[in-house]
Image (cartoon, grey):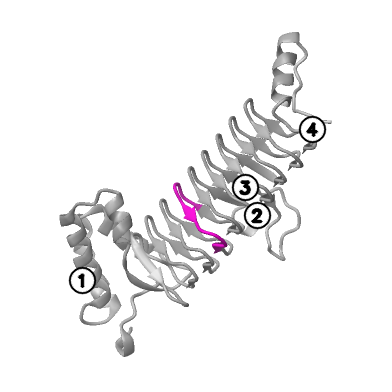
Amino acid sequence: MVLLRHRPKSARCWQTDRARMSNIDPTARIESGATIADGVKIGPYCIVGSDVSIAAGTHLVAHVIVTGHTSIGSNCVIHPFASLGSPPQDLGYRGEPTQLEIGNDCIIRESVTMNVGSLKGGGLTKVGDRGIFMAYSHVGHDCQVGDDAIFANSATLGGHCLIGNSVYIGGLTAVHQFVRIGTQAMVAGMTGVRGDVIPFGFATGQHAHLEGLNVIGMKRRKFSRERLHKMRAFYNDLFHGAGLFDQRLAALQGRAGDDSAIADILAFIEDGKKRPLCKAVRGADED
């Protein structure tokens, strides 16, 4: 039996409630207390917990489990065997009512997992709008993922990661706990990311290093040729110039006013605390 929160008593509202229930497969299990908006479609054998909220137009295709204190935005499509809102994979978790928030218009493919937060991490795992999470990708506890993210198959975030807007993470890539990946960065497949990746950077390798800038992504976002040239010059001076990295970084602070993207990179580096910075490989003189 499907139970919906605040069942109305008037005849008109009862008809609306029946229409809503017609979008819920009879094999689905919706616990009392769940908030299901109009237009939500819940397919066969889905399970929705009592503290779950699902906004209008979202579709749980089949065999989806949504549990914990989880909210899902509007017009998302969630494919079979996804598990959203399960407890954090943290030995210190004791069942506290932490949260998972998923934005609007996300596509969550087969067997994706996303965990609620932990108390020591702030209690919230948050995923932005229009994300695409391909099969078997994972968002660990207390992660913050921006808008328009793309996670390829089996891309994995450890806990407490910060992922900017329009980030692409390749298949079979693992991101270490507390790593930050800046806006519009790209991480190649089969990469182990142990350090922070600058905005607009392109990281690759068994142990990730910067290969350069995400030029293809920047072109797609209408960066002019002049702007790309400016960004390349800044990148080369920062990562391949003379002297130690800290000396080069200090010398380039004045370029923050040249372009907002350069300002973003400099601010990102300045804000780093938990993990080392992912740098370009320079061979034996790498500093």
Horizontally, residue 155 falls left or right of residue 283, namely: right
Cα separation, mark 3 vs mark 1, equals: 42 Å
Q: Residue at x 47, y 67 (%)?
A: 189
x 62%, y 27%: residue: 39
Q: Nearer the viewer, residue 62 or 236?
A: 62
Q: Amino acid at mark 2?
A: Ser
N-term-proximal mark, 1 vs 2: 2
Q: Amino acid at mark 1?
A: Ala
Return the residue nearer the eye: 138 or 190.
Answer: 190
Indicate which disc, 4 or 3, sits on the residue closer to the N terminus.
4
Relative vertical location of residue 192 with respect to residue 99 in this rendering, above or below: below
Q: Secondary structure at mark 4?
A: loop
First reached walking from the N terminus: tag 1 or tag 4 = 4
Task: Report if residue 178 lies within the magenta region.
Answer: no
Q: CA distance from mark 1 to mark 4?
A: 65 Å
Q: To which residue does mark 4 refer? A: 26
Residue 100: give its label.
3
Residue designated by label 2: 111
The CA span between labels 2 and 3 is 17 Å
Residue 265 higher or lower than 6, as above or below: below
Circle nearer the viewer, 3 or 1: 3
**Number of marks in picture:** 4
Q: Quadrant of residue 61?
A: top right
